Amino acid sequence: MQSRDLRTLREYQEHASKTEADGNDTAQRLDRIESEFHAAFDFLSKLPDSVSIFGSTRSLPSSPEYEQARQLAARFVTDKQFAVVTGGGPGIMEAANRGALEAGGISAGLTIELSTGEAVNEYLNQSLRFHYFFARKMALSFAASMYIFFPGGFGTMDEFFELITLVQTRKIERIPIFCIGTSYWQPLRRFMEHYMLHPDGYITEADLGLFTITDDLDLVLECAKYCQVRH
């Protein structure tokens, strides 16, 4: 076994030992999970029709995608009277919450406790904090009438693929999913075409229609009129 493999094996062994030593009591964890789900459903039931906006925590206010997210969120408030829901962190989430708040609308953040200490942005007028990622992801997708994805990293991809899988498998109804930024998202779609659709058919042609890639914010807002209230 190579030294790199041994190093990786030792890291996993050390992690497993620490996890076992620090593990929480199962009953307490289940109680906390149940509490987070109850709190999430109660929080969401009090919101009007909403849009969930996702994207990188690292996008700076000077970036084009930050300004796009800010403008789009503001227009969702002024043109459609939607609440804007994000993960409540920095980057694209901050931009969307900022746009919604500046437009006088509901700017909601479903924030998460992280060991890295991710900051909560200052543009929230409603918020709910989570310990568990899966409970937070459920809340972000549960009540939204539309999903908007800006460029992002692993977290954005996790949320994107989970949502299109839920629609693909009909665990949730067909809901508009827009990916803003053709230069970022088109290469991912080409990967799906070349390696998932062809040659082995891991997905179908129809699956590629579960989301729309665009730079046209007017198109996104026009489609919002056909959204169905989900709570």
Image: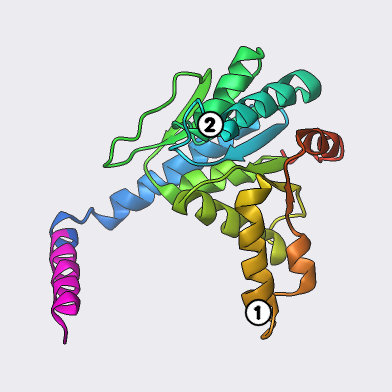
Whether residue 45 sits left or right of residue 24 in the image: it is right
Q: Which residues are magenta?
A: 1-18
For the residue pair 99 and 133, the one nearer the viewer reads as 99
Q: Amino acid at mark 2?
A: Ser
Q: Is residue 73 magenta?
A: no
Residue 30 located left or right of residue 72: left
Picture residue at 70% right of the left edge, 76% below the top: 197
Q: In this view of the protein, which residue sits in the foreground, 220 or 68?
A: 68
Placement of 35 over or under 50, stated as above or below: below
Q: Which residue is mark 2?
A: 63
Kind of residue at badge 1: Tyr
- Which residue was labeled with disc 1? 202
The image's colour scheme reads: rainbow
When asked about the image quadrant of residue 171, the answer is bottom right
Residue under the image location 70 percent in, 59 percent down = 167
* Label 1 or label 2, whichever comes before in sequence order: 2
Residue 67 on image: x %, y %: 60, 27
Q: Secondary structure under badge 1?
A: loop
Q: Position of residue 20 (x, y in %)?
A: 17, 63
Q: Quadrant of the C terminus?
A: top right
Vertical placement of residue 150 versus 197, above or below? above
Q: Nearer the viewer, residue 203 or 133?
A: 203
Between the C-alphas of marks 1 and 2, the distance is 36 Å
Question: What residue is shown at x 69% (from left), y 32% (from top)?
Answer: 50
Residue 14 lies within the magenta run: yes
